[in-house]
């Protein structure tokens, strides 16, 4: 019986998360769930104006899901492969620039 209850709770959470992904505007509770943060943490973020939000009537907070996605994806960290590729590209472009400036001098 307990296993059935656990499975039902898991299904309920999956349905809720699916519903959140289809909503364009999230209320405060939805945003907490979507961001996986506590209510107090989200209040701190909104009061410090660190997360984009709307307050149309001066009391309730609402969030644009796409803006939250963009906010979550800020400060991306490059992989070591990407950093190596960038370093190689920088070295190659410097070499090209040096060669072209040397040929212009001659």
Image: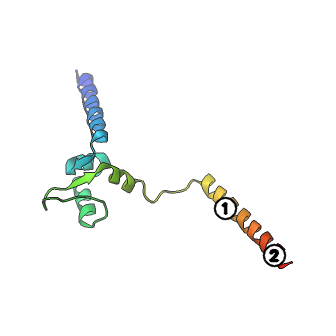
Q: Which residue is drawn at 26% across and 36% down?
A: 16
Q: Mark 1, residues whose alpha carbon is within 10 Å: few (<14), some, or many (≥20)?
A: few
- Residue 41 lies, in percent from the top left, at 26, 58
Q: What residue is disc 2 on?
A: 104
Residue 4, quarter of the rendered image: top left
Frontmost residue, 98 versus 27: 98
Q: How far apart are marks 2 and 1 (CA)?
A: 26 Å
Q: Mark 2, residues whose alpha carbon is within 10 Å: few (<14), some, or many (≥20)?
A: few
Give the SS element for disc 2. helix
- Residue 95 lies, in percent from the top left, at 76, 67
Q: Is residue 36 at least partly visible in the picture?
A: no
- Residue 94 lies, in percent from the top left, at 72, 68
Q: Is residue 8 above or below residue 105?
A: above
Q: What residue is disc 1 on?
A: 87
Q: Residue at x 55, y 56 (%)?
A: 78
Q: In this view, does 96 lie to the left or right of 53?
A: right
> Which quadrant is the C terminus positioned in?
bottom right
Q: Nearer the viewer, mark 2 or mark 1?
A: 2
Q: Is residue 83 above or below residue 14?
A: below
User: Residue 22: which numbered mark, if any?
Assistant: none
């Amino acid at each position: 019986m307990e296993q059935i209850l656990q499975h039902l709770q898991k299904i309920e959470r999956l349905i809720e998360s699916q519903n959140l992904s289809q909503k364009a505007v999230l209320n405060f509770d939805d945003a907490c769930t979507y961001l996986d943060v506590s209510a107090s943490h989200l209040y701190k973020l909104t009061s410090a104006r660190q997360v984009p939000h709307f307050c149309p009537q001066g009391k309730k907070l609402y969030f644009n899901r796409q803006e939250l996605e963009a906010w979550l994806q800020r400060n991306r960290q490059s992989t070591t492969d990407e950093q190596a590729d960038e370093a190689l590209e920088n070295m190659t472009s410097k070499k090209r620039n040096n060669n072209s400036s040397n040929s212009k001098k001659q």
